[in-house]
Image (tube, rainbow, N blue to C red):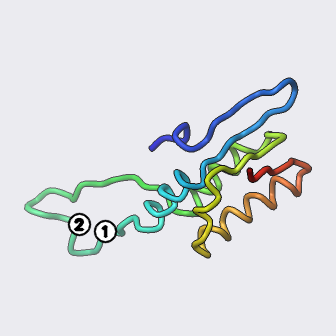
Amino acid sequence: MKRRDFLLFKTEGRTKTVELSCERLYMQFVDARRAPEPSATDLVVDGEPPARFDRRTVQQLFADIAREVHDADVLRLTHTEWLTEEDFRREVTTLVDAVRGRGGRVEMP
């Protein structure tokens, strides 16, 4: 899933708005949190290294999103019913606080 799947960038006049789907972001969060770590026994199988899939950690995921929304005037969160899990809600709240802390506006319709 690419960032375009859960981030939508809009310009309304001089206002830069980023729309963030909590539903789609949650799917990315779950993937990042459950990324398997290779064990020592997985290093070589039949002379071949195991398949390697680059996955972002939760910290990398939210750091990437924070960079994407850094210069947005408005952050609009959609599908906020997905904010029920505590760890996910905490990460999104940290992102929201950062946007508000720099003078941005957050909308949760």
Please name the residue shown 65% across and 55% down the image. 63
Q: Position of residue 107 (x, y in %)?
A: 79, 50
Please state if 34 lies on the left or on the right of 97 as rendered. left
Q: Residue furthest left?
A: 46
Nearest the viewer among 3 and 60 is: 3
Residue 46 left/right relative to 108: left
Please state which of the two labelled residues, at mark 1 or mark 2, is closer to the viewer: 1
Q: Amino acid at mark 1?
A: Pro
| Quadrant that contains the N terminus | top left
- Verify CB contact (< 8 Å) between mark 1 and mark 2: yes
Q: Residue at x 39, y 52 (%)?
A: 54
Amino acid identity at mark 2: Leu
Give the camera-side residue of 79 and 86.
79
Residue at screen point 73% across, 58% down: 95
Callout 1: 10 Å neighbours few (<14), some, many (20+)?
A: few
Q: Earlier in the sequence, mark 1 or mark 2?
A: 1
x, y percent for residue 12: 81, 27
- Which numbered dot is residue 43? 2
Under circle 1, the secondary element is loop
Seen in the picture, residue 27 relative to 75 is either above or below; the reply is: below
Q: In which image quadrant can residue 74 be found?
A: top right
Q: Which mark is residue 38?
A: 1
Across and down, in percent, residue 100 comes to 86, 55
Residue at the (15%, 56%) spot, across then down: 48
Q: How many marks?
A: 2
Identify the secondary structure beneath mark 2.
loop
Classify 10 Å Cα crowding around label 2: few (below 14), some (14-19), many (20 and above).
few
Give me the C-alpha separation between circle 1 and circle 2: 7 Å
- Identify the mark at residue 71; answer none if there is no mark: none
Which corner quadrant of the image does residue 49 belong to?
A: bottom left
